[in-house]
Image (cartoon, rainbow, N blue to C red):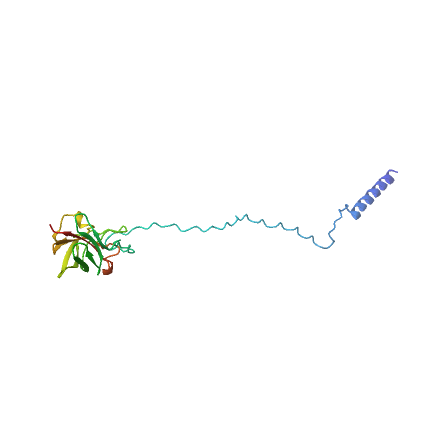
Amino acid sequence: MRTDRYFVLLTLLTLTILSIAGCGSPLTPTSQPLGVPPSAPPMPAPATPNTPPTVAASPSAAPTRGTIAPTGATATRAATPRATASTVGASPVAGGGARLVLRLGQSSDVAATGLTIRFSAVTEESRCPRSTGGVYMTCAWAGQAIVFVDAKRGAETNSLRLTIPGLTDDTTQRPASAAAAITFAGYRIQIVSLEPQPTTTGGKPDQGEYVVTLLVTAVP
């Protein structure tokens, strides 16, 4: 009996083992077909680098550079407009006589004197240039300008030479100069100014630009 019991138990144990080996452990069903290798999981999208936004640079105006005035006698710049007399003709002065303003080649009668005076020529222009536009000139000599005027009174005529020193705006404001005045027919004729003067930027005036101012007074 005991042997039979052991045999039955052994048989049951064997059947249980065979049952487990034949069926195997239950599997979790999947949708993947048999024989097809599982597909690789999708790769994550590459991270987009954080590119800083492009900002268009606004054009900026070029810096304005300060103009530095050249110095020295050899520096050149655009010529500045030359001064000219505002009034051409004769005007009376206190104490008798007249002040004449004449362009080159012009003439004028001097009222109550019988004189006619004509500005005829500029024969020398060596006056030291005036400093203009930040350009400076140092001259060892002030220089001079020599002009000729034709004077006439009745039948008497003469060509008069007058000299004005450089860097002079008005000879009546300077000590008297014998070369700046001359006597003719009982009248003293003095050169007061000759414009324009040479400049460091424009050089010597053209002949057609000259304007002379003369002072005519009676000789005591």
Q: Is residue 98 left or right of residue 67?
A: left
Tell me how many marks there are: 0
Q: Position of residue 72 (x, y in %)?
A: 24, 52
Residue visible at 83% across and 45% down? 15
Residue 7 drawn at (x, y percent) = 85, 42
The quarter of the displayed image where residue 5 is located: top right
Q: Nearer the viewer, residue 182 or 153?
A: 153
One can see residue 193 in this view: no
The residue at the far right in this view is 1
Task: Kindly indicate the quadrant of the structure image that contains residue 2.
Answer: top right
x 84%, y 42%: residue: 12
- Which residue is most to the top? 2
Whether residue 5 is visible, yes or no, is yes
- The quarter of the image holding the N terminus is top right
Residue 45, horizontal then vertical, whole percent: 61, 50
| Viewer-nearest residue: 132 or 162 | 162
Closer-to-camera residue (131/147)? 147
In percent of width and height, residue 198 lies at: 22, 55
